[in-house]
Amino acid sequence: MPAETSQTLDRGLRVLKVLADSPEGLTVTELSGRLAVNRTVVYRLISTLEQHGLVRRDARSRLFVGLGVLQLASAVQPLLRDLAMPVLRSLAESIGSTAHLTVADGDEALALAVVEPTWTDFHVAYRVGARHALSQGAAGKAITLLDGGESTYAVTSGELQSGARGLAAPVRGVEGLRASVGIVTLDGAIDESVVAPQVIAAAAEVAQRLR
């Protein structure tokens, strides 16, 4: 027997998802059309979400996701870090390179968790909170693979730091999360036949922990 659900809550969550996918904003009429719900219902939903800071409207009355969502998102980041850290630690020690979990933040890649190997003489110091364009670096390019394509990982050389090489795989199958797991090294060319399977497996394990 299916569990009972709240239609109002479901519609409110759909409002947030539709607005999150509409960076240019939507009018009430446009939102009503996207949701296939009449305007009166949409007005009530928007009014409630505005009171909680989850939806905002600009001077043209176009609707956007509100800043209140950031507070909710910030509470999720420590959970992501805690769940990913054991996987990153194992990956860093196995390969001997700095391992990281990177998430998409708009058009940027944000390093959310970083683990450095304990036994190497030299390794890349990759700072938590570091940002770069999604179009640069293995971590960002791996995240864009979630949008399609046959590649299972991305590899780059010298795009973010001279001499640094990176390999990263997207974290797949976690709804609402755009992230990658990867490694970065200064030790010459990356042996993709050895490193790629371990990074892909680590990304899959992180995804499993988050489901």
Image: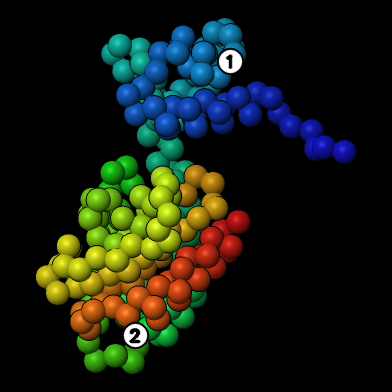
In percent of width and height, residue 168 lies at: 36, 65
Regarding residue 184, the answer to whether it shows in the image is yes
In percent of width and height, residue 27 lies at: 40, 13
Q: Is residue 139 left or right of residue 46?
A: left
Give the secondary structure at mark 1: loop
Q: Residue at x 32, y 80 (%)?
A: 191
Q: CA distance from mark 2 to mark 1?
A: 53 Å
Q: How many marks?
A: 2
The disc at residue 159 is none
What residue does disc 2 label? Answer: 96
What residue does disc 1 label? Answer: 36
In terms of depth relative to the viewer, which is nearer, 55 or 87?
A: 87
Give the secondary structure at mark 2: loop
Q: In this rendering, is residue 29 above or below 129?
A: above
Which quarter of the rendered picture does the C terminus lie within? Answer: bottom right
Q: Quadrant of residue 28?
A: top left
Q: Quadrant of residue 6?
A: top right
Q: In this rendering, is residue 75 above or below 195?
A: above
In percent of width and height, residue 188 lies at: 20, 82
Residue kind at label 1, given as amino acid type: Ala
Crowding at mark 1 (Cα within 10 Å: few <14, some 14-19, many 20+): few
Of labels 2 and 1, earlier in sequence is 1
In the rendered image, the residue lying farthest to the left is: 162
In percent of width and height, residue 200 lies at: 46, 68
Q: Quadrant of residue 208?
A: bottom right
